[in-house]
Image: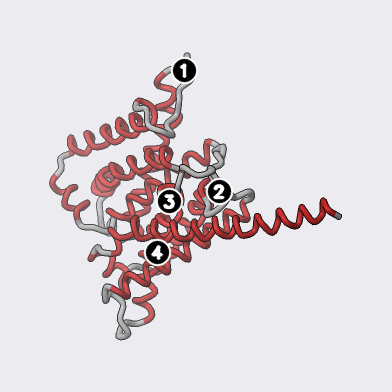
Amino acid sequence: MRKAADGDCRRAKGQPDRLGHFINGLGRGGAGALLFGIPMLMTMEMWSLGFYIARERLLVLLIALLPLLVLLARRIGFERVSSWREAGRDAIVAYGIGISASAIVLLTLGLITGHMSAHEIVGKIAIQSAPASIGAMLGRSQLANRTGDGSGETEIETSYGGELLLMATGALFLSLNIAPTDEIMVLVYKMTLWHILAVALLSMALMHGFVYAVSFTGGHELSAGTPAWHAFVRFTLPGYVVALAVSFAALWIFERLDDRSALETLSCMIVLGFPAAIGAAAARLIL
């Protein structure tokens, strides 16, 4: 009887701790949503995109974001995550935080009014909630107090496919902030083919250096006897391809590739791929 009572007492004590940890995670998620989402929330191109962007393209963005959020939740959820079901729950919570934060900020800034149609309001909130939801999940990782007991900081082993998906998350996060702007098109028109090639080479060099050549926390350690080209072929090159694919998807979603030639499309991908590659490399370092 005494053992049963002690077990009930420990469970009762653990419940508030678990709830408090989850609430703290929500607070950090809200801060992360604002911190990482503000650049897009205060960008004029994003305000108009919410009105005219094709709804099927917006739906593709929102659907594609879910598995990325689930993977992030599996690594850095709002509390200790022991199953994919709990990771899915945290991903939905992050989405909710992103939607709420976007709606509050847009409403406060007068970018949502009662005179707007439901079509425009939903479009504005939906498109802004994508980076805000990623920020909500990253907020737990970047804003957590790491001097405590280490609660929730369990290292999760990531498969090769998971590594590439993490890279896609980092690439998507930075791409979403830049793809809607006119600067990408302006840069493409100003650059020659040699500039485009130089950007591609610089992107891969920085991506490789961030993770392998520089002693950043979270970087990969090459085992003794492993040739240098192995890491480049296995991670850097596929990671850059992922960054280019994400860049293409972001440009397509935001209708920046309509009526473009193949060369212009490739140039736009490489230019946007520069920040996307950095985001892909940084994702492995910070997550």
Residue at position x 43%, y 26% in the image: 231
Q: Which type of secondary structure does the marked residue at label 4 adopt?
A: helix
Residue position for label 2? 74
In the picture, the disc for residue 226 is 1
Q: Is residue 117 rendered to the left or right of residue 82?
A: left
Q: Residue furthest right?
A: 1
**Mark 3 vs 1, N-terminal side:** 3
- Amino acid, disc 4: Ser
Q: Which type of secondary structure does the marked residue at label 2 adopt?
A: helix
> Where the N terminus falls, by quadrant?
bottom right
* Depth check, front residue: 227 or 185: 227
Residue position for label 3? 138
* Depth check, front residue: 257 or 183: 183
Q: Which type of secondary structure does the marked residue at label 1 adopt?
A: loop
Mark whose residue sits in front, 1 or 2: 2
Q: CA distance from mark 4 to mark 1?
A: 42 Å
